[in-house]
Image: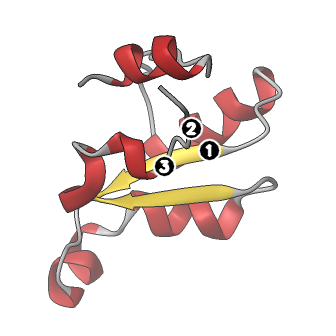
Amino acid sequence: ETAREVSRECGVPVRAQVLRGEPHARVLEHARQEDARMIVLGTFGLRAVDRFILGSVAERTVRAADRPIVLVPRALVSSLRLLVPCRR
């Protein structure tokens, strides 16, 4: 199921947008502009060496955030029901 389908079923508003720029900075800027109560980010689970070389968007976002952040491991991204408690 897609996030949109889960959103419809549970009455949780979801909106996706594509933004250009430094990912962590744009995510935080957009969250502030939209007055988001929470940020949900998927993670790729890079190894320490890869993260050292490439950096981590999730880590940078968490360190600079002024609101709660939920990090979703890659393995769970396709299973959004774990994050959206709803009754069918």
Please give the residue where the numbered disc 2 appears in the rendered image. Answer: 27
**First of labels 2, 1 by sequence position:** 2
SS state under label 3: loop
Q: Residue at x 56, y 38 (%)?
A: 27
Query: In the image, is 7 to the left or to the right of 50?
Result: right
Q: Secondary structure at mark 1?
A: strand
Query: Which of the two residues, 17 or 5, is positioned nearer the viewer here?
Result: 5
Is 79 on the left-hand or right-hand side of 25? left
Residue type at tag 2? Val
**How many other residues sit within 10 Å of disc 3, few (<14), some (14-19) or many (≥20)?**
few
Q: Are the residues flagged by discs 2 and 1 in contact, CB closer than 8 Å?
A: yes
Return the x and y of residue 34 as percentages of the image width and height. Answer: 76, 21
Nearest to viewer (mark 2 / mark 3):
3
Residues at marks 2 and 3 touching, judged by CB atoms closer than 8 Å: no
From this view, report whether residue 46 is shown above or below residue 15. below
Residue 41 versus residue 28: which sits nearer the camera? Answer: 41
x, y percentage for residue 10? 55, 22
Q: Is residue 51 left or right of residue 17?
A: left
Q: Residues within 10 Å of mark 1 (few under 14, many from 20)?
A: some
64, 87: nearer the viewer:
87
Badge number at residue 83: 3
Instruction: Identify the image quadrant of residue 26.
Output: top right
Q: Amino acid at mark 1?
A: Ile
What is the distance, in whole Å, between disc 2 and disc 3 at their CAs?
20 Å
In the picture of the structure, the residue carrying the numbered disc 1 is 39
Query: Where's residue 44, x and y in %?
Result: 23, 61
| Residue at point 48%, 49% (across, down) | 83
- The residue type indicated by label 3 comes to Leu
